[in-house]
Image (cartoon, rainbow, N blue to C red):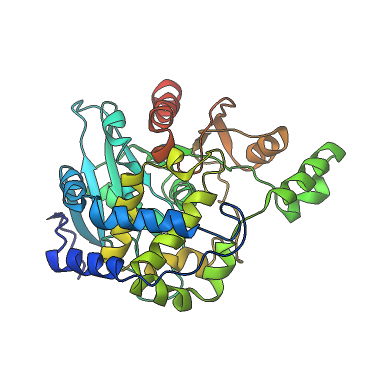
Amino acid sequence: MTNTALRPFRIEIAQADLDDLNDRLARTRWSAQLPGENWDRGVPVSYLRELADYWRTEFDWRAQEAALNAHPQFLTEIDGLDVHFLHIRSADPNALPLILTHGWPNTFVEFTKTIPLLTKSFHLVIPSVPGFGFSAAPHEIGMKPRRVARMWVELMARLGYDRYGVQGGDLGAYVVQEMAIADPDHIVGVHIDGGIGLPTESDVPTMTAEELAEWELMQKWQSGVNHHVLLNKAPQTFAHAWTDSPVGLLAWLVHKFNEFSPLANHLEDAVDRDHLLTNISIYWFTNTAATSSWPIYNGLGDNGFTWPAGQKLVPVGVYAGGSALMRRLADRDNIIAHWPEGNTGNHFLAMDVPEAHAADIRTFFLDRLV
């Protein structure tokens, strides 16, 4: 029988786990720096050594833990899995409920800077995706964003919310569109960070000459380590190193966060150092480097990698719109109600530009839909 109770939860990392982390960091066997400039061969040894030393000697996990525990947290069983979530009610009893879904390789920590900016207007629900952080991992293959969406719909119903908004980026963008498909009668709008309307090979036959030129340019933008291929083919192989070595985990996640920050001169211009290390510490302490890979080895889509599904059941807004081609494709598959073109920021907007991100969310839900 499913236990539908909402059980209070606090993060309490054992001191022995902190001591073990610091011991492993102190005993790191460092690789030689390969020839090349800056990040040409990956995360530079000098930068990683300095960051690892900061993690060991200056980063204050207990302070971060206390800050996270200042927010009400719970566990509840849904679909056979314990789900961890923050539930932060606004001082306004009539505020709109809003559920925020994080991306990969992130955790619920992605939203900590936006919480105080959004709780004036929204009751916030911030769950940890299954296999990430303090949520239980799937027990079998086949977990898809569609299943997570149904779990989130159940969570919102369990909390007593019959009218609410949904927001997400990266992996979260897949989940929120599926939520709209699963529960259109209760969802007032879908807000996505960006990327909606991105073309695929199947769109090429419908493109004009001008759009084809844009498509060709897009192909040249593809760069970096293709984590979709890596985690689709051999997540277990790589997770052995990420699970055994905190520096191995640090290097992998820093590499990806750096690739996700193309507009920044330096990674830490886009993601605050302590914010980054809090996120990485969650992965380390919960041993979820492996279990968080399910979205990619199961395929984001029904037939391998695809962009988030479109839906015309609930209005959609994006933080940053795109070209005329992207708008055409977005309109084809969605009811676009919000398409600003002046917003900027890197991939994880809630970490990079929290004020602008929160303002855009408020504009979409409160000015246009409520």
x, y percent for residue 276 = 36, 49
**Camera-side residue of 326 and 253:** 253
Query: In this rendering, would 104 be left or right of 96?
Result: right
Q: Looking at the image, is 22 positioned above or below residue 177?
A: below
Q: Residue at x 54, y 61 (%)?
A: 300
Quarter of the picture holding the N terminus: bottom left
| Residue 127 makes an appearance in the image | yes
Quarter of the picture holding the C terminus: top left
Query: In this rendering, would 124 be left or right of 332?
Result: left
x, y percent for residue 308 = 55, 51
The image quarter in which residue 41 lies:
bottom right
Q: Looking at the image, is 143 positioned above or below residue 44?
A: below
Q: Residue furthest right?
A: 209
Q: How many marks?
A: 0
| Residue 154 makes an appearance in the image | no
Q: Residue furthest top?
A: 367
Query: In this rendering, would 333 be left or right of 296?
Result: right
x, y percent for residue 198 = 65, 45
The image quarter in which residue 306 lies:
bottom right
**Camera-side residue of 290 and 97:** 290
**Camera-side residue of 76 and 252:** 252
